[in-house]
Amino acid sequence: MGGYKNLLIYRLARTIFDFNFIFIERWIDKKGRTYDQMYQAARSGKQNIAEGSKEISSSSELLLNSVSRSSYTELIEDYEDFLRQRKLPVWKKEDPRVLRIRTFQEKTDKDTNLTDLASWTQLDLNIPENFANMMICLCYKQGYLIDQFLRSKQEKFVKEGGFRENLFRKRREFQKRLIK
């Protein structure tokens, strides 16, 4: 396994995608639009990271990762709506359960599963409040990580230029060598 699949943002995206599927299968009406929207948002978050990693153009890579970032914001809204509509609390960021979830690390050598996360967080994930709040925490964590990733890519672009810029530079160097 190499390339983008080793990126923490991809590993967490895969974890969110898998757990989101379990959540929507358990607690969201399969015939409703929310089911499809939540599935597509989680899928978009993961797939845009993969697609962006294969882009030659820096601007396209940044755009796709930005779309991924937006997908996690959409998922947060869906989970908060789920909790609000059922009069369940959204945990505060200082809540010990939130702090525990935020310290969880996705593994590189195997898929993270609910048993790993339930054990780590000491949460009963058969309770919708716990599961939805865990997903909100994971999506916020992913948003933070993608923001850092985007900042790093932007700094690299500023220092090194983009694909077209570098291609044009190489073309000019080639032309100069021909003239000599």
Image (cartoon, rainbow, N blue to C red):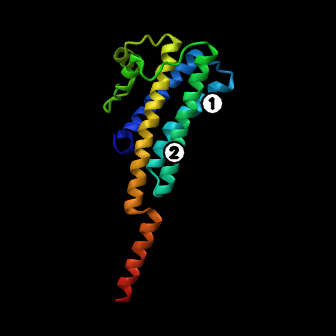
**Residue displayed at 43% across by 36% down:** 144
The image quadrant of residue 10 is: top left
Q: Can you give x and y, in whole percent of width and height, for residue 46 in the image? A: 49, 37
Q: Quadrant of the C terminus?
A: bottom left
**Residue displayed at 38% across by 56% down:** 156
Q: Earlier in the sequence, mark 1 or mark 2?
A: 1
Residue density around tag 2, few if under 14, some if 14–19, many if 20 or more, within 10 Å: many
In the displayed structure, 150 sits above or below 56; it is above
Q: Nearer the viewer, residue 175 or 70?
A: 70
Q: Name the kind of residue labelled 2 in the image.
A: Ser
In the displayed structure, 140 sits above or below 169; it is above
The residue wearing badge 1 is 37
The residue wearing badge 2 is 66
Number of numbered discs:
2
Task: Check disc 1 and report its element: helix, strand or loop.
Answer: helix
Q: Name the kind of residue labelled 1 in the image.
A: Gln
Task: Check disc 2 and report its element: helix, strand or loop.
Answer: helix
Viewer-side label of 1, 2: 2
Mark 1 and mark 2 in contact? Answer it, CB < 8 Å: no
The image quadrant of residue 112 is: top left
Q: Can you give x and y, in whole percent of width and height, for residue 138 in the image? A: 45, 27
Is residue 133 found left or right of 106 in the rendered image? Answer: right
Q: Can you give x and y, in whole percent of width and height, for residue 133 in the image? A: 49, 19
Label 1 and label 2: CA atoms lie apart by: 18 Å
